[in-house]
């Protein structure tokens, strides 16, 4: 419905469609139990069956984080979440729809979005992190949500094996 996300902050870069993934459990048929969400700019080069079949371990989501210590700390302050809550990247995300149907409430998301619209930078990621970040199983960003920045950060660490295009 046109007013499904009324009141949610939106900009030209972040239209209301970014919130669809947060309402997936309400929008998809009840017989669907898990969904793999992929941003449209995601390039897939290997099978995602391991990710798709992975155990949620009683979490609502499985996703990656790309933030390191300092940015994690800043996001924790900005979003007023605990130190144990990682900043979630929503570009590649598994969703546990039965748990979402029980625990993810659109009105709670709307209230948070309206109350915090002045601190939201990446609204869908900020909201997911703030409200449900403690219910996300982190998966390996180098395997499931790799970016060129991740490779640079990884390779800057002298204690890790260097990654290149052959890797």
Image (spheres, grey):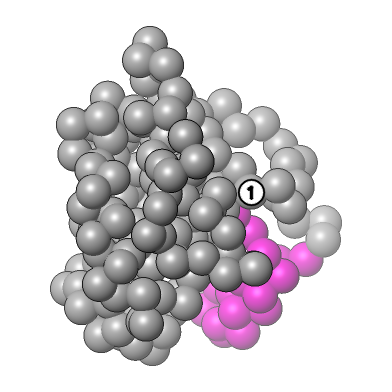
Circle 1: element type: loop
Q: Which residues are magenta?
A: 143-164
- From the viewer's perspective, is residue 14 above or below residue 160? above
Q: Quadrant of the C terminus?
A: bottom right
Name the residue beneath numbered marker 1: 39
- From the viewer's perspective, is residue 105 above or below residue 26? below
Which one is nearer the viewer's eye here, 83 or 121? 121
Which one is nearer the viewer's eye here, 47 or 59? 59
Q: Is residue 10 magenta?
A: no
Furthest toward the right, the residue is: 166
Q: Position of residue 51 (x, y in %)?
A: 50, 35
Furthest toward the top, the residue is: 31
- From the viewer's perspective, is residue 1 above or below residue 154? above
Q: Position of residue 110 (x, y in %)?
A: 30, 56
| Residue in view at x 73 percent, y 52 percent | 41
Q: Position of residue 150 (x, y in %)?
A: 61, 71
| Residue in view at x 70 percent, y 47 percent | 40
């Amino acid at each position: 419905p046109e007013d499904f996300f009324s009141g949610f902050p939106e900009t030209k870069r972040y239209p209301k469609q970014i919130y669809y993934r947060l309402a997936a459990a309400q929008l998809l048929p009840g017989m669907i139990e898990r969904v793999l969400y992929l941003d449209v700019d995601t390039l897939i080069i290997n099978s995602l069956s391991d990710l798709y079949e992975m155990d949620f371990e009683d979490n609502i989501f499985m996703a990656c984080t790309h933030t390191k210590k300092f940015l994690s700390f800043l996001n924790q302050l900005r979003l007023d979440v605990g130190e144990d809550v990682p900043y979630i990247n929503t570009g590649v995300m598994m969703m546990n729809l039965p748990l979402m149907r029980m625990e993810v409430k659109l009105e709670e998301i709307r209230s948070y979005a309206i109350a915090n619209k002045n601190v939201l930078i990446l609204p869908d990621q900020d909201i997911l992190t703030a409200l449900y970040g403690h219910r996300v199983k982190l998966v390996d960003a180098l395997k499931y949500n790799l970016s060129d920045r991740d490779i640079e950060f990884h390779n800057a660490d002298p204690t890790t094996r260097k990654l290149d295009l052959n890797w």
